Amino acid sequence: MKKYDIGFAAAGSVMSIIFIMLVNYLTSSQYPWFIYPSILLLLWPIGLYSRKSGNYKLLSIICSTFIIGIIIAENFIYSPNYAWSLYAIYPILLWPILVLLGKKAKTIRVAIIGSLSIILYYSILNGFFSPGYFWFIYPSFVVLWWPLSLFHARKKTYYKFSIHASILLITFFICINIISTPHTIWAVYPIFCVLWWPLSMYYFVYKKNVASNSKL
């Protein structure tokens, strides 16, 4: 990388931001849309510096701070009566947190703590903003795949993973069926499809491995 790359990127970003601000002021001053491309332009020299120095922690902290700042500003300016930015803040914060943890971020303990903290976070938001419908089940279902996949990938127990993952899927469909449409039992249809996953793993993978091991 050349010596003056970062300086060129910084100067180019500043010049571009000034130009965009002028265009915004002259054409549509009632809406400050220049903020969005300006954020991307600012990340150019920052990302270049982080890559050159190998300081990816700095990049994650600055980028997440910029994104959270923009989201909060948008929320405060255009819809101050509803704090929708809270739904996005914690997942964005996980980026620098996991980067700062380094190698520890790949451990099962961190995956469990991270997924449980996300579930708790959205459960609180659910109870505070919309207690009438338990929508926190959807993000909970997504984040539970994190420790589950990591555990079985480490152990290389892919057949057991299909069983546990199928149980998670079946539980999810049953919960959604009960909460959303308790008078219509539709969960049996996706459950039937899910059951083919561990069955196929058993007959085409597990039994094959058992047979090959017995020959040895």
Image (cartoon, rainbow, N blue to C red):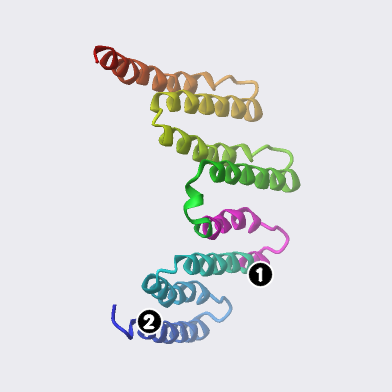
Locate the C terminus by quadrant. Answer: top left
Name the secondary structure under disc 2: helix
Please say if 124 is above or below 51. Answer: above
Q: Which residues make up the magenta segment? A: 74-98
Asked if 151 appears above or below 53 in the picture, the reply is above
Mark 2–mark 1 Cα distance, whole angstroms, equals 33 Å
**Residue that badge 1 annotates:** 77
Q: Rate crowding at label 2 as few (under 14), some (14 to 19) or many (20 or more) other CA atoms within 10 Å.
A: some
Provide residue 38's location: percent of width, then percent of height: 48, 76
Kindly state the secondary structure of the residue where label 1 is placed.
helix
The residue singled out by tag 2 in the image is 6
97 falls in the magenta region? yes
**Outermost residue toward the front in this view:** 216
Say which quadrant the N terminus sits in.
bottom left
Q: Is residue 91 above or below residue 184?
A: below
Of pointers 2 and 1, the one earlier in the residue sequence:
2
86 left or right, relative to 164: right
Q: Which mark is residue 24?
A: none
Q: Is residue 69 magenta?
A: no
| Front residue (pair 26, 167) | 167
User: Where 168 falls versus 15 (above or below)?
Assistant: above
Task: Bin the neighbour count of mark 1 within 10 Å (Cα to Cα): few under 14, some 14-19, many 20 and up.
Answer: few
